Structure formats: C-alpha cells, structure tokens
Image (cartoon, rainbow, N blue to C red):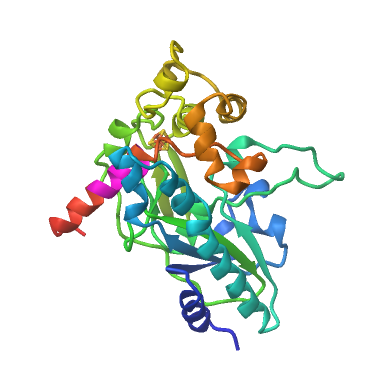
Amino acid sequence: MLTSQKLKKFAKAVGADLIGIAPIGRFVDAPADMHPCSIFPETKSVVVLACRLLKGSFRGIKEGTDWYSYLIYGYGPGIYGTLVDATYRTKKFIESFGWEAVESPGKAALYEMGPERAPVADGKLPPDVTISMRLAAAAAGLGELGHSKVFLTPEFGPRQRFAIILTDAELEPDPLYEGILCDNCMKCVYHCPGRAIGQKKNITAEIEGRLFSWADLDYGKCKLTHWGFNKDASPFMVKDLPGLSMDVVEQTMTWREAFDFGHTLAKEVEYIALTAKGNSELEHGGSPGSICGARGCIQACVEHWESRKVDGEL
Ligand code: SF4
C-alpha cells in the first residue's frame, strides 16, 4: 500500500531534498486555469518536490568572473536534471502501486506570460494550464512566500526549485507551515537592480485560513534586468551596446514584451549570445542567460538568511 511515509522516503532517496503533500481541497479557491483538476480531474493529492539551489551557484556572478554557472546549475540541467529525474522516478513509484501520477513542472513565469494559444476545442481552457508552484509548495506545507514572492523554506531559505506531481492516490497530507520565515527586512527590494519588487505586500492568497502575502512584481523590469539589459546589473551592456541609454526603471514593458525584446536583441549583445550558447537548449529558441543572478530576490535574501542563522534567529 502506498503511504506518504513510503513516498517521502523514496523521493528523498532518488534526489529530492524536500517533499510535501497537499490534499486537493486546499486548491478550492484556485482559478480554473491554475487548478490541478484542470490537468488531472481525478487529483486527490498534490505532491511537491524540491531540489536545493546551491549557494556556490551564485559565486561566479558575485565575483564577476563567470556568468554560466548560475544559468546551468541554478536554472538548467544542474538543478532541473536532478529534479526531473527525482520527479520521474517518484511518478514511477506512485504508478507501481496502481495509481496515476501526472507531472506539472514548475514554471514560474508562464502564467504571467498569458495563454499563447486559443483553446483547442469549445469548453476547453487555453493551453497550457499552469499550477502556481509556489502556492502548491505553500499548500504542501513546505514554507511560505517571502516579500519578493520567492518561496522560503525553513531548510534552505530562498534556495530551491520545485516540481509538482498530481495523483489520484489519497495520501496523508502535511500540515500547512505555521511559522513566519520572511521578517520583512526589505533587502530584496533595495538590492533588486530593476526596482521590480514592490514596497508593500499587497497580493494575498488564503489556504485553509492561513494567509500568504507577497509584493506585486513588475515582471517587465525583472525580465529586462534578469537578461542583462540593465546597466546596474550587467557589465556587458556598455561594452556590447555602447551609447544605448535605457533606464530599465523607467520601462513599462510587460513580461511578454520584455521577453520578445530580449530574444530579438540577444544575438546583438555579444556576452548574452555567448551565455546562451552555454546551454544547448538556448541555441534552439530558448532564453538568454541570467545576468542579474537574482541579486535582490535571492542573493540578498540568502545573505540576510545566513546572518539570521548566525544570530540564532533561525
Ligand atoms: S531576478 Fe533580478 S531583477 Fe528580477 S526580481 Fe530578482 S533581483 Fe530583481
């Protein structure tokens, strides 16, 4: 018989650092285009796996000497290779007990991107339905969303990425995380070079009476900065596009517009094109590299998190 205990033991043995389980009832308020049952109507349990993002992944960007490592080990096969492998093996484990296991890979930005296509038939939702991985992680009891919307766990602070498995197996759920991890230090806001993170926690979601809140983000400014079109975050702009004066903080592009802008210009910006070549997927229409290195939303948060550990607060 499949139990939560057996499932957790297995998932950790095959590479997951964290695993939490939410009953489907915790998604009662999710909109249809983010609801697990829109993907797998028989879903009874939502299993969330996480792999930790290693502190050393940021070192090259911090030193200003290597912009590949974070992209490859923080975004690409370095972390997702392990996470996808652990997810696939965990799905096989669930199905070996006669249940069905449906993956929903965490895609942070896709929902903001909006549906790319019309529904394939009358009565269908537009593809692709995307579950909020951060709210799924909250529902699975793994932690809470911090001010910047980056998810915090007691084990790793802001350093992890998620994958989701939907199953018709009714598993013993984890309780919601009851502690408070984000102390509203605002370091993410002050250190974000794109000024993309709002000052106030004005977005909320309630799960079984527990309120999760985070600040509104300007996804266009974030995307432009993340991809290196911000002189405050990228030393390459002035070298590769001399004379271009573009204050990212003044831009009003949407995430989608910034995404298209990045793809159009990436080939013209020598280092971004070079970074993209560091990841073979990117050569086939993928995204430019991460030049910002999440220096506000993750790096500043990690530093603060570590100092709280030293001070015995955590
Ligand atoms: S990735 Fe960079 S620009 Fe985007 S929110 Fe984080 S620190 Fe700000």
Q: Quadrant of the N terminus?
A: bottom right
Q: Residue 271, position in %: x, y?
A: 47, 31
Please tell me which residue is depicted at 62% across the width and 47% down the height of the picture. Answer: 281
- Is residue 42 found left or right of 79 in the rendered image? right
Residue 141 vertical placement versus 114 (above, below)? below
Residue lying furthest bottom: 1
| Residue 147 at least partly seen | no
Tell me residue 92's x, y (percent). 65, 76
Which quadrant does ligand 1 occupy?
top left
Q: Is residue 20 magenta?
A: no
Q: Residue at x 44, y 51 (%)?
A: 74
Compare residues 252 and 80 and report the one nearer the observer: 80
Residue at 48% from the left image edge and 58% from the top image edge = 79
Residue that extends furthest to the right in the rendered view of this protein: 121
State which region is magenta. 296-303
Q: Please provide percent x and percent y for residue 301.
A: 29, 45
Q: Is residue 176 left or right of residue 136?
A: left
Q: Is residue 132 left or right of residue 183?
A: right
Q: Main secondary structure of the magenta part?
A: helix
Among the 4 quarters of the image, the one containing residue 225: top left
Residue 299 coordinates in the image, percent (x, y): 32, 44
Q: Is residue 56 visible to the viewer in this orientation of the structure?
A: yes
- Compared with residue 29, is residue 245 higher up or lower down, i.e. above or below? above
State the quadrant of the C terminus.
Answer: bottom left
Pick the residue in front: 186 or 267. 267
Q: Against 191, is 284 above or below? A: below
Residue nearer the viewer, 79 or 163: 79
